[in-house]
Image (cartoon, grey):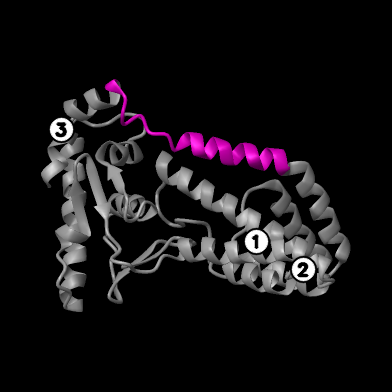
Amino acid sequence: MDLKVLGGLAVHEGGVSISPPSAATRQVLALLVASADRVVPTCAMAEELWPEEVPENAGQILETHVRQLRATIGAALQTEGSVRTAEEVLAWVPGGYRLGTGGGSSDARVFERTAGAGYRAMETGDLDLASRRLREALDLWTAAPFAGVAQGPHLRSHAALLTGSWQRAVDRWIDVDFRLGRWRELCADLAQVLSRFPPPALPYVQLKADLDTKGHDPEVIRRHLHRRRNALSFTAHRIVMGRQGSRSTCGSDRALSLAAAHGIGALQRA
């Protein structure tokens, strides 16, 4: 199974698209994709869909989403001629569900791996290689993470962490290319990167505006580097808050009581 989240959600099994028509089912799929090959607790699914108040028939609704996803996955597996079943791909495990990729690709994992190669090249002083790897990593992005998918607290947290990783890669790439004296090419390339994914963080909003109005001016990069230094503590705070936001109340007595009251526990053998 091949997964893409660095832009719109795209899931393929053997080249066949897995795209449920229901917006809520796509949201559940996105949450499973965000934690691919790991267990997503059923109470986390409920928190994602109903962050304010869990409906009384939450268990039945979640079971319907799981059935729809398995039906779509099963159709793709049949087209592919796979020996795997939908129940094996979207497997129930005690307490939740796991979406098994079967060793497929993930653009988020490729991004982290490629950006990591760029960071290691920086540490060894190979700035040319670092520049290439960081640009390759950034070229994987086509829009905001999970674009077009409704986002509850868990997906927002995943998106915030991915955005933080994107910001780090952009900042390191700017550092490297500016040190290499490639400011003219850097301005042109940055304009392309920011046109695909202009994040809401102020330093990048201002950078894009400066590039749009002033073009290939090295002072644009210098001003951004200065603003970025001033904004580092703010960016770190956003990332920390994103991690805190991902903490689920699934293990709390209140959450377990809510889950039982709304029939979510009945999902365990769906």
Q: Between residues 261 and 244, which one lies in front from this camera angle?
A: 244
Label 1, residues with CA under 10 Å away: few <14, some 14-19, many ≥20: many
Identified by mark 3, the residue type is Gly
Find disc 3 in the rendering and name its residue.
Answer: 263
Any part of residue 121 in sight? yes
For this view, does 61 lie left or right of residue 54?
left
Find disc 2 in the rendering and name its residue.
Answer: 177
Find disc 1 in the rendering and name its residue.
Answer: 119
Indicate which label's residue lies in the foreground, 1 or 3. 1
Image coordinates for residue 223, horizontal then vertical, percent: 84, 54
Indicate which label's residue lies in the foreground, 3 or 2. 2
- Which residue of the protein is positioned furthest toward the front in this rendering? 124
For this view, does 108 lie left or right of residue 90?
right
Image coordinates for residue 126, horizontal then vertical, percent: 73, 70
The answer to whether mark 1 and mark 3 are in CB contact below 8 A is no
Q: How far apart are the two marked residues, 1 and 2, measured between alpha carbons?
A: 13 Å
Any part of residue 152 in sight? no
Circle nearer the N terminus (1, 2): 1
Secondary structure that dominates the magenta span: helix
For this view, does 139 lie left or right of residue 261?
right
Q: How far apart are the two marked residues, 3 and 2, measured between alpha carbons?
A: 56 Å
Image coordinates for residue 29, horizontal then vertical, percent: 31, 54
Residue sitting at 32 percent across and 41 percent down? 49
Position of 64 relative to 126 (above/below): above
Marks counted in the figure total 3
Image coordinates for residue 182, horizontal then vertical, percent: 81, 73
Circle nearer the N terminus (3, 2): 2
